[in-house]
Image (cartoon, rainbow, N blue to C red):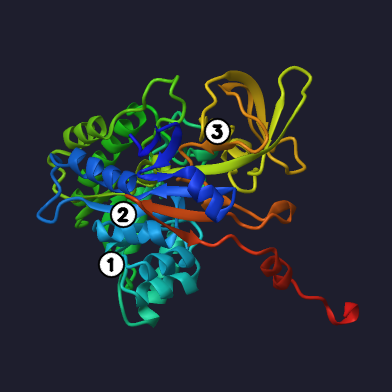
Amino acid sequence: MDHFQIRDGVMHAEDVPLTLIAEAAGTPVYVYSTATIRRHVRVFREALANVESGAEGPWIAYAVKANPNAAVLATLAREGLGADVVSGGELLRAIHAGVDPAKIVFSGVGKTADEMALALRHGIGQFNVESEPEAEMLSDVAVALGTTAPIAFRINPDVDAGTHAKISTGKSENKFGIAYHRASAAYARARALPGLAVRGVAVHIGSQLTNLAPLETAFTKIGGLIETLRAEGHAIATADLGGGLGVPYDPALPLPPSPAAYGEMVARVTAGWNVRLMFEPGRLIVANAGALVSRVIRVKEGAADPFVIVDAAMNDLMRPALYDAWHDIRTIVPRSQRFTANVVGPVCESGDTFAMNRPMDAVEAGDLVGFMTAGAYGATMASTYNSRPLTAEVMVDGNNWAVVRERLPIEALIAADSLPPWLK
Ligand SMILES: *Cc1c(COP(=O)(O)O)cnc(C)c1O
């Protein structure tokens, strides 16, 4: 459920007409709904109400890469969420937005020594280590700083997540994690390293999962591994089950499993594990809380269907070009007629296509459209390709709204380059 609804003939974000935001902030513009973000946090928490997770309850670390805007992070920090970060940059943004460092977990296969030191100095809660060489480097960095790093190993359970290949992470051929059969050796190695405090296991098999079965298979394997590791003398206190739950993009498709169904499965599979459970939801929290609002530049005749050329492009919302992703395209002020069209951006790539042969509300030049479910992996993936300045972002809360990221002026892009002496 989201808070983008038509009221008096105009789509609103909560109580604010999107026409007003588009006029004031320009287009294209990402618009986020605070109420939707908060609602998703509440729904996810409630879904985990019955899991066994020790005295402290589940540790929910929002996956910052889904949407790292400071206003989003600050909203989530106030809800008490931690953060799952995959770079020193995300770590600093999360802390700057008010996330408690003790609730931060650092994931990723390529953490550098500098990033490790940064995270140790900030006292983050856990490192999810993805290889033995990484464990050795982290131990060295921790020893040099006179501290110990709390770690879990990310296990690659060799499970097919059944999602798009580019967002699958839990197959043995993917770069992520330590192979299940290598886990015992890795934990034994880590125990011998002076800078590490081994405390848990972690798994994350992919994103936009629309079926619970692969998650259940992966979690069951992790349960077995916890028993093995404990029998080998390791104190396993945390189990991080990652993120990945899918969200509805296309209303014509069956709904993905609900958070409640996910929570029920987790409670059943993890019963008796005797750990603190950790979760890293990203998309689930923010996807439906965002829309990319764009203006139709013109409608051009096509071989079959017309081309609707909008002022947003693949550099603003990359998912369709990158993953063949499907976004609902709605008119902000519906005309009550329908047509079939191809919706494209101005970038000079045929891949700059949001939709082909799409039955949709009819539009004319100057109309506003919304690319829905764009709050996750939207603005954060934007680039300045075709020298298009990064899009503005707006946050709505009830009848309040504010620009939470200014549109980058083209002057900033020009000023970022400099000429070598021989061209001056
Ligand atoms: C991307 C990522 C997530 C979040 O995935 P969603 O599908 O957005 O929930 C969680 N954990 C790790 C390690 C990730 O890389």
For mark 1, does the 10 Å Cα neighbourhood hold few (<14), some (14 to 19), or many (20 or more) residues?
many
Q: Is mark 3 within 8 Å of ligand 1?
A: no
Residue designated by label 2: 61
Q: CA distance from mark 3 to mark 2?
A: 25 Å
Marks 1,2: beta carbons within 8 A? no
Q: CA distance from mark 1 to mark 2?
A: 10 Å
Q: Nearer the viewer, mark 3 or mark 2?
A: 3
Q: In terms of sequence position, does the residue under pointer 3 or pointer 1 come before the other? A: 1
Can residue 127 be seen in the rendering of this structure? no
For mark 2, does the 10 Å Cα neighbourhood hold few (<14), some (14 to 19), or many (20 or more) residues?
many
Mark 1 residue element: loop
- Report x, y in % for residue 306: 72, 23
Write the residue at 13% across / 56% down. Answer: 56
Residue type (three-letter) at the residue carrying disc 1:
Asp
Name the side, left or right, on which 339 lies relative to 173. right
- Report x, y in % for residue 22: 54, 48
Name the side, left or right, on which 225 lies relative to 96. left
> Going by the picture, which residue comes out furthest to the right?
422
Write the residue at 54% across / 55% down. Answer: 25
Against 318, is 259 above or below?
A: above
Residue 325: mark in rendering: 3
User: Split into 4 quadrants, where in the image is the N terminus?
Assistant: top left
Marks 3,2: beta carbons within 8 A? no
Q: In terms of sequence position, does the residue under pointer 3 or pointer 2 come before the other? A: 2
Q: In terms of sequence position, does the residue under pointer 1 or pointer 2 come before the other? A: 2
User: Split into 4 quadrants, where in the image is the C terminus?
Assistant: bottom right
Residue designated by label 1: 100
Residue type (three-letter) at the residue carrying disc 2:
Ala
For mark 3, does the 10 Å Cα neighbourhood hold few (<14), some (14 to 19), or many (20 or more) residues?
some
Residue type (three-letter) at the residue carrying disc 3:
Ala
